[in-house]
Image (tube, grey):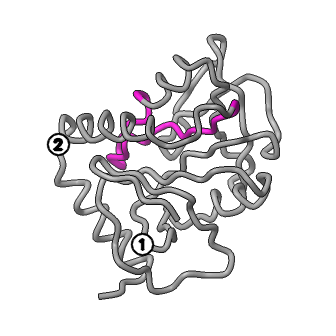
């Protein structure tokens, strides 16, 4: 049965809330390992979101360790003016602090343009079998992904397997190139 984005957000947040921290940690490590099988590791600039603990998101720190261990350039987002993102090169001198809505953000660092980003790991509640995603509803990532170069690889990381179809996709929504779960990689 097809569901709307708002229905999916509610259902999947409830499903997340039922998961233990150790289960999320195990899933996060599995997803990080799965990402090693995607043909992206010859690229250089990797945009990765920093997890929101109170939303029980996938912990992206294992994947960030992989990116740094492979000597890639990690780039993390920061909310700018509550309606868009800016992108900061993450390094040893970057200071992270939780913002008002619980997202860890860089407080300093070099701002980079979206058009140099090769790979984006996209936060989401769910994705469908066509590569559509349900995010948090603010449109931050759709705006950002449209600023990236045309061949930027968009990878959604999901705690749960995909839904068959999301009902109310908009022309403003940007599709994923890959969806990754603990057990599978989906290519679109």
The quarter in which the N terminus is drawn is bottom left
What range of the chain is rendered magenta?
A: 44-62
Q: Earlier in the sequence, mark 2 or mark 1?
A: 2
Horizontal side of 21 relative to 50 (left or right) equals left
The answer for how far apart the CA atoms under marks 2 and 1 are is 27 Å
Q: Is mark 1 on a helix, strand or loop?
A: loop
The residue closer to the viewer here, 158 or 98, is: 158
Residue corresponding to mark 2? 20
Horizontal side of 85 relative to 180 (left or right) equals right
The x, y position of residue 61, in whole percent, is 43, 28
Disc 1: CA contacts within 10 A as few (<14), some (14-19) or many (>=20): some
Residue 68 placement: quadrant = top right
Given the current orientation, which residue lies at the most extreme top position? 92
Magenta run includes residue 118: no
Q: Is mark 2 on a helix, strand or loop?
A: loop
The x, y position of residue 163, in whole percent, is 34, 73
Disc 2: CA contacts within 10 A as few (<14), some (14-19) or many (>=20): few
Horizontal side of 42 relative to 86 (left or right) equals left
Horizontal side of 87 relative to 170 (left or right) equals right
Q: Nearer the viewer, mark 2 or mark 1?
A: 1
Q: Is residue 188 above or below residue 93?
A: below
Residue at 48% x, 54% y is 156
Q: In this view, does 7 lie above or below 188?
A: below
Residue at 64% x, 31% y is 42
Residue at 24% x, 63% y is 14
The residue closer to the viewer here, 114 or 88, is: 114
Do the residues bearing badges 2 and 1 touch, measured as CB atoms within 8 Å? no
Residue corresponding to mark 1? 129
Q: Is residue 60 above or below residue 90?
A: below
The x, y position of residue 126, in whole percent, is 39, 64
């Amino acid at each position: 049965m097809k569901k709307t984005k708002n229905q999916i957000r509610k259902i999947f947040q409830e499903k997340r809330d039922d998961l233990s921290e150790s289960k999320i940690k195990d899933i996060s490590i599995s997803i990080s390992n799965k990402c090693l099988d995607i043909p992206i590791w010859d690229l250089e600039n990797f945009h990765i979101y920093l997890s929101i603990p109170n939303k029980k998101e996938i912990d992206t720190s294992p994947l960030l360790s992989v990116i740094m261990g492979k000597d890639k350039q990690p780039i993390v987002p920061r909310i700018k003016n509550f309606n868009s993102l800016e992108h900061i090169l993450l390094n040893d001198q970057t200071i992270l602090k939780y913002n008002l809505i619980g997202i860890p953000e860089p407080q300093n660092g070099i701002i980079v343009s979206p058009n140099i980003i090769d790979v984006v790991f996209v936060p989401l509640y769910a994705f469908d079998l066509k590569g559509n995603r349900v995010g948090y509803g603010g449109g931050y990532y759709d705006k950002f992904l449209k600023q990236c170069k045309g061949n930027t690889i968009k990878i959604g990381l999901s705690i749960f397997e995909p839904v068959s179809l999301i009902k109310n996709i908009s022309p403003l929504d940007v599709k994923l190139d890959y969806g990754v779960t603990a057990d599978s990689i989906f290519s679109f």
